[in-house]
């Protein structure tokens, strides 16, 4: 499977990442991608950018050379009610909102509590992508929640970074992918790059999907036509 966009990438504005937006874009150009997103961590994480950084993302152009540039955030799920750390008006101004749990922002609870959090995130109209939800600290009832993600038009992320830095999540990712296949839930494979060297590095995630014969048509970033249609559908302008 060939992927044409990486929609979860960090820059030095998340202070534990190592490259600039321009560096990431250069990789996208070199790899002949159609799109890339800038999705730094939401303001609830201690070393995240300021709110005004997100408010000002509209100053970025839609296209840089031939690459469609999407302005996003990886919002933090802050509690077991599924509350996010970003103001609604700012999320509305962005193209893409990924919602993820991180132990630096939320205290892990019980499986039932995480299930409740994800059910509320599923219903949040500002959220587009459910980020790396295989994290074992925040495990939830996959059987119950995955079909609900579909009901509310959420895309489930298969996060390639997990295969490098969250090894304990790999089996959970496989289970999540199998349920997405069973319930026909669209997924996106993203690198979650924290340096330019990780942009588009998703081989292990793709190998996992291949091992379960995951249908290519459910991988939203495996075709520009499919991704573009999705982006227009969620209101992204000028693409
Ligand atoms: Zn994350
Ligand atoms: Zn991330």
Image (cartoon, rainbow, N blue to C red):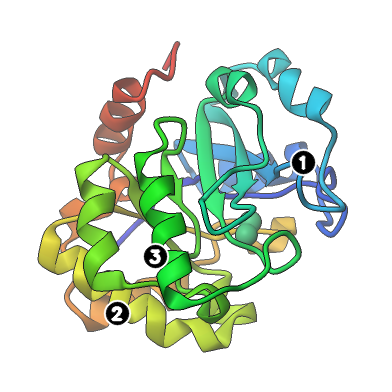
Which SS class for mark 3? helix
Given residues 83 and 62, the one toward you in this image is 83
Which SS class for mark 1? loop
**Do tag 1 and tag 2 residues touch (Cβ < 8 Å)?**
no
Q: CA distance from mark 1 to mark 2?
A: 31 Å
Looking at the picture, how far across and down is residue 85, in whole percent? 67, 41
Residue where numbered disc 2 is placed = 175
Above or below, 125 against 112 in this view is above
Residue 189, visible in the rendered structure: no
Above or below, 127 against 109 in this view is above
Looking at the picture, how far across and down is residue 193, in whole percent? 65, 58
Residue where numbered disc 1 is placed = 43
Q: Which is in the foreground here, disc 2 or disc 3?
A: 3
Residue where numbered disc 3 is placed = 115
Looking at the picture, how far across and down is residue 43, in whole percent? 77, 41
Q: Which badge, 2 or 3, comes first in the chain's sequence?
A: 3
Q: Which is in the foreground here, disc 1 or disc 3?
A: 3
Q: In the picture provided, is 119 more to the left or to the right than 51?
A: left
Which SS class for mark 2? helix
Q: CA distance from mark 1 to mark 3?
A: 23 Å
Q: Which is in the foreground here, disc 1 or disc 2?
A: 1
Quarter of the image with the C terminus is top left
Q: Residue at x 12, y 68 (%)?
A: 182
**Do tag 2 and tag 3 residues touch (Cβ < 8 Å)?**
no
Mark 3 residue's CB less than 8 Å from ligand 1: no
Asked which quadrant contains residue 154, the reply is top left
């Amino acid at each position: 499977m060939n992927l044409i966009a990486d929609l979860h990438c960090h820059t030095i504005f998340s202070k534990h990442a190592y490259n600039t937006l321009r560096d990431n874009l250069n990789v996208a150009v070199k790899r002949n991608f159609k799109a890339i997103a800038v999705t730094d961590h939401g303001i609830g994480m201690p070393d995240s950018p300021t709110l005004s950084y997100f408010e000002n993302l509209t100053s970025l152009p839609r296209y840089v050379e031939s690459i469609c540039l999407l302005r996003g955030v990886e919002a933090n799920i802050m509690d077991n009610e599924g509350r996010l750390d970003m103001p609604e008006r700012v999320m509305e101004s962005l193209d893409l909102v990924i919602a993820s749990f991180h132990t630096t922002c939320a205290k892990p609870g019980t499986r039932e509590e995480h299930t409740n959090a994800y059910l509320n995130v599923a219903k949040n109209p500002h959220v587009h992508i459910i980020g790396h939800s295989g994290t074992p600290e925040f495990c939830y009832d996959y059987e119950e929640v995955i079909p609900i993600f579909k009901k509310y038009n959420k895309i489930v992320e298969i996060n390639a970074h997990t295969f490098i830095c969250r090894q304990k999540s790999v089996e959970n990712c496989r289970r999540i992918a199998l349920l997405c296949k069973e319930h026909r839930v669209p997924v996106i494979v993203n690198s979650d790059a924290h340096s330019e060297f990780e942009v588009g590095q998703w081989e292990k995630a793709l190998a996992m999907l291949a091992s379960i014969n995951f249908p290519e048509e459910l991988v939203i970033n495996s075709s520009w036509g499919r991704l573009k249609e999705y982006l227009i559908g969620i209101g992204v302008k000028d693409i």
